[in-house]
């Protein structure tokens, strides 16, 4: 591939949830060859890179974030040679490939864990995980930590000791104080770099290092993140200082290859994040702020301004994310009344509070925001089709461990993982020639790639046009200046383009300039309607 140093700083990265993208063999689950057959869609969209959710051998208890073998492809997804063919074909089309690396935990099916639990306490093979005697007479877990999917973060082994799992019991945490664990991941990284992978997305990049004494934790408001506290806190398992040594070790490996990058999924306090982005650590980190920002001009403005300032201060590039495989899709979020707890709403409703049209309009307007900002923009598969959350999946098909572990109080993340509709009709709308692993609603056909491809007013056309215009008009100048067009209006200038978004309830006068791109489907006159973005030259 043509070398273009620091390609990640401005790229559009398309997130592929492999299991739900395209199925080539009729088992109802997406696979690598399915993805290969649909690369034309990604090339036409104009993306610079794809990030693949984990594709390694896995029992798929947490969608593949439970890895049984880091050097093998999950057979449901294909083979190592399919993966190599995919990498080569992506490169031929000018698309880079980012793989997902899961270092905090393995699957309980990983040979190391099987060895650990069949060895006696004190055996070296047990030291690769965090295994401890219980408290009191041994029947109480070693501390009060709660797993992210609910329930205690410890499970008792048959021999009476307990193992730590910050996520599902099938995802035992590795012991990163063990040199063998560190060496193994160095080797895994080299394995994939040698196969031409261009970058790594590091899962739970703030979680590997635990406090040596494993003390109790004061419950935080949000167990997922350290972002909600006014000041950074000293936490026994999130964001510990020892992580930076690991980051540096990996960065040194990547730097021994050309043009490779790593991006952190690090839910840390904003004051700690720059530490992850030092010159010898990560190239970039996801900024999830927009996922948590309501449809409000003042809030968008402050999130964007702060992220741009923070990135500029340390010479990093910003990243923009509206949706991913862990959150309620944004057309649905934007269609709900302000203040709705979207995760809770999935199960509890009220479902008639959803204004799907408003959500769709706002998602169109939001695309022209994230695709016009400096830095790189991550697009989650289906976002370019305007797919909303499928909030009404039948309960008996739910697969996310959250549903069971929360004792059926939190529905989980399946509604954003429903397979992509490629065709208006046919079994699973062209995703597979059989039924898909999660059922698609009937109305998915109207949002299919086929239905949208030649419609100039479709979401797909909007994404294509915006990505093309971004590359053409906005690539060279990464500076952004906020403009004040009054309350309810978000406005900024980039290169020779002015971006104006009416996020208020009433139309505002159209600012001067030639409309290069608009999120509206009708011709605009001298007013900019609510929930509408324009790029003006
Ligand atoms: C973050 C991933 O995005 C999520 O899907 C997964 O469940 C957890 N990490 C655990 O690996």
Image: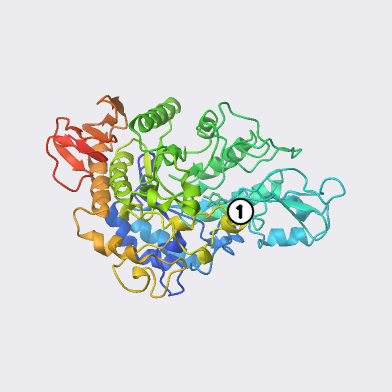
- Image position of 234 with respect to 408: above or below: above
Q: Is residue 147 left or right of residue 192?
A: right
- Image position of 53 with respect to 314: above or below: below
Q: What is the number of callouts on the image?
A: 1
Q: Position of residue 291 (x, y in %)?
A: 43, 41
Furthest residue to the left? 525
Q: Position of residue 175 (x, y in %)?
A: 70, 47
- Image position of 381 with respect to 236: above or below: below
Residue lying at 44% horizontally and 37% vertically, measured from the top left? 289
Q: How is the image coloured?
A: rainbow
Furthest residue to the right? 137
Q: Position of residue 389 (x, y in %)?
A: 41, 54
Q: Nearer the viewer, residue 295 or 268?
A: 295
Residue lying at 33% horizontally and 58% vertically, measured from the top left? 92
Residue lying at 54% horizontally and 48% vertically, measured from the top left? 203
Q: Nearer the viewer, residue 86 or 297?
A: 297
Q: Nearer the viewer, residue 501 or 131?
A: 501
The quarter of the image holding the C terminus is: top left
Q: Nearer the viewer, residue 232 or 365?
A: 365
User: In which quarter of the view is residue 431 placed?
Assistant: bottom left
How busy is the neighbourhood of tag 1: few (under 14 within 10 Å), some, or many (20 plus)?
A: some
Mark 1 lies on a secondary structure that is loop
Asked whether mark 1 lies closer than 8 Å to ligand 1, one says no
**Residue to which mark 1 is pinned:** 406
The answer to whether residue 5 is seen in the rendering is: no
Q: Position of residue 23 (x, y in %)?
A: 41, 69
The answer to whether residue 237 is seen in the rendering is: yes
User: In which quarter of the view is residue 312 placed?
Assistant: top left
């Amino acid at each position: 591939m043509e070398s273009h140093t620091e390609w990640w700083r401005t790229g559009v990265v398309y997130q592929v949830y492999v299991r739900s993208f395209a199925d080539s063999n009729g088992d109802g689950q997406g696979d690598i060859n399915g993805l290969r057959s649909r690369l034309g869609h990604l090339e036409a969209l104009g993306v610079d890179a794809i990030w693949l959710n984990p594709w390694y051998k896995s029992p798929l208890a947490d969608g593949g974030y439970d890895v049984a073998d880091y050097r093998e492809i999950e057979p449901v997804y294909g083979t190592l040679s399919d993966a190599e063919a995919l990498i080569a074909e992506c490169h031929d089309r000018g698309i880079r490939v980012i793989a997902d690396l899961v270092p905090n935990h393995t699957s309980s099916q990983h040979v190391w864990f099987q060895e650990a639990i069949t060895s006696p306490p004190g055996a070296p093979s047990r030291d690769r995980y965090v295994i401890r005697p219980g408290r009191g007479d041994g029947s109480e877990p070693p501390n009060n930590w709660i797993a992210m999917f609910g329930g205690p973060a410890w499970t008792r082994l048959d021999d009476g000791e307990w193992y730590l799992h910050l996520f599902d019991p099938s995802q035992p945490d590795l012991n990163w104080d063990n040199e063998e664990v560190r060496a193994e991941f160095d080797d895994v990284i080299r394995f994939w770099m040698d196969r031409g992978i261009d970058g790594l997305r590091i899962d739970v990049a703030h979680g590997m290092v635990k406090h040596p004494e494993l003390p109790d934790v004061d419950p935080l408001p949000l167990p997922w993140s350290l972002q909600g506290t006014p000041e950074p806190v000293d936490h026994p398992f999130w964001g510990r200082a020892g992580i930076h040594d690991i980051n540096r070790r990996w960065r040194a490996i990547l730097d021994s290859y050309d043009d490779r990058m790593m991006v952190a999924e690090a839910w840390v306090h904003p004051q700690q994040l720059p530490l992850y982005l030092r010159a010898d650590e990560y190239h970039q980190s996801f900024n999830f702020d927009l996922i948590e920002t309501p449809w409000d001009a003042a809030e968008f403005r402050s999130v964007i301004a702060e992220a741009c300032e923070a990135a500029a201060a340390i010479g990093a590039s910003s990243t923009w994310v509206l949706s991913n495989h862990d959150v309620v899709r944004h057309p649905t979020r934007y269609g709900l009344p302000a203040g709705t707890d979207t995760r809770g709403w999935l199960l509890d409703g009220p479902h008639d509070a959803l204004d799907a049209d408003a959500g769709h309009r706002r998602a169109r307007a939001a695309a022209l925001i994230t695709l016009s900002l400096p830095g790189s923009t991550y697009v989650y598969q289906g976002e370019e089709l305007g797919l909303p959350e499928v909030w009404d999946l039948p309960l008996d098909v739910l697969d996310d461990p959250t549903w069971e572990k929360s004792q059926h109080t939190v529905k989980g993340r399946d509604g954003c993982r429903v397979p992509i509709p490629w065709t208006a009709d046919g079994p699973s709308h062209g995703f597979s020639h059989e039924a898909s692993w999660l059922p698609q609603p009937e109305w998915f056909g109207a949002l299919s790639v086929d239905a949208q491809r030649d419609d100039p007013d479709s979401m797909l056309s909007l994404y294509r046009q915006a990505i093309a215009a971004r590359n053409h008009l906005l690539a060279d100048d990464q500076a952004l200046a906020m403009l004040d067009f009054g309350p309810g209006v978000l406005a900024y200038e980039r290169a020779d383009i002015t971006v104006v978004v009416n996020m208020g309830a009433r139309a505002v006068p159209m600012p001067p300039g030639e409309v290069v791109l608009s999120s509206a489907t009708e011709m605009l006159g001298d007013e900019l309607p609510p929930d509408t973005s324009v790029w003006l030259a």
